[in-house]
Image (cartoon, rainbow, N blue to C red):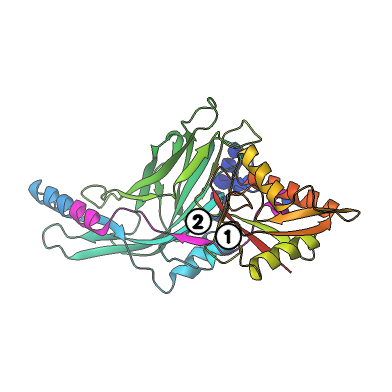
Amino acid sequence: MHIRYRRLLSAGAVTLGLLAGCLTTAQASTATSTAAQAPAAITPTTAAQAKSACDEQLKAARDDGSSKPVACVSWAKPTAGDRQAAITAWPAPEWCDDHGANNTWYITRFKACGVFAADVTVHDVRTGRVTGKMHYLVIAYAYSDYSIERWAYQVELVQVSASGDAKGSSANGKGTCKGKCKVNDSKFPSQKMGQDKEAVGQFFFDTTIKARPKGDKGNGTGTAHWKFTNPRWAAPTNEITLSSPTVRCDNALPGTSRIGCVMPYIPELVYSKRGEFPELAKHIEYAQNTKHLPGKHGTSKYLTRLTDKAKIKKNRAKACPSSRPRPAGKECDEYPFASTWQGASTGSGNFSWRMIPKKQNQDGGKALGNFYLYNRILEKDRFLVWIRN
């Protein structure tokens, strides 16, 4: 069962060019943080919508004089055994796995994952008595790429338990997209559920923003739809849906003409005091902790990117004027960065400067540029800076 799902995942990754939208090791070490991921709200078919659809199906079956049972699908509260079932079914990323089945999306800049619990309940059409039930998990995974105008969304339906008239059910569905996007490919054929069988849907979406004129951006939200069938039932279940987090695609990133897509996660630039730029890292740590300047890991005092070259030049000139003496082999480093709206000129007037080794200053600046590029940090996008030991 696990091999089939991983094969689908791999096929999707080839289409996107990089497995699950991952950065290369070199890029990741300077460009992104491995901080705990932020949760996002679930946006599924509501309980009221599911109940209304079920009531309509029961009424239709009675009106037709059917003697076959009617099955309804709805979201459910996770059970004690769901976490282990999710881990056994699919090797999800740790930041998704750690939370188990809690009906919540967890997001990075290029990935989103969540484990959601749901039920199929089968009713006697005349009495309403429950004649069977299936409890299952939806393991949802979406991923994008910083330089490709397509993103992917996959759902795996894993049976945890089944009884009575719910046994032997099959699932099938489709994918749709709302906003600045269109469906490129939607595959969710009918697949039987069971202890060693799961149903998988895989969808690819393309942004509809154009490569020209430069500066365009737009959001799109992919949604998975599915229902269950069983030869014992009068009809398929009501449809249930789960939307992925919204994806933003753009052609507005300075330094590249390629369109790319990101998730709604605020990224963090990581500098280490034991890494390539220790003096730069120590300066930022001092600026954040002693001068209480914005951008610190674990806070909501964000830095926001500035792309206007003239304003960046003014920030740099105010923090590190040419009149300030430079010791041999050193350059002036400023914080907040000149390329942010919190810089010396465009910000509140609070800033810090320090002379640090020339190579660290220049290479640290290149790392900042790579961070902007690989995380598609646009004008006024928020980010943080994490100083690690």
The residue identified by callout 2 is: 113
Front in this rendered view, residue 364 or 240? 364
- Give the quarter of the image for residue 172: top left
Considering the image in quadrants, where does the C terminus appear?
Answer: bottom right
Spatial distance from mark 1 to mark 2, Cα to Cα?
Answer: 8 Å
Front in this rendered view, residue 184 or 172? 184
Residue name at image x 53 percent, y 36 percent: 250
Give whichever of discs 1 and 2 has the lower sequence position.
Answer: 1
- Give the quarter of the image for residue 158: bottom left
Q: Residues within 10 Å of mark 2 (few under 14, many from 20)?
A: many
Residue 93 is marked as: 1
Residue name at image x 39 percent, y 71 percent: 79
- Magenta-tinted stretch: 26-54
In this view, which residue lies farthest toward the front? 323
Do labels 1 and 2 touch, CB within 8 Å?
A: yes
Image coords of residue 369 (percent x, y):
69, 45
Amino acid type at mark 1 = Pro
In this rendering, the answer to whether 104 lies above or below 223 is below
Q: Residues within 10 Å of mark 1 (few under 14, many from 20)?
A: some
Front in this rendered view, residue 211 or 227? 211
Residue 260 is marked as: none
Secondary element type, mark 1: loop
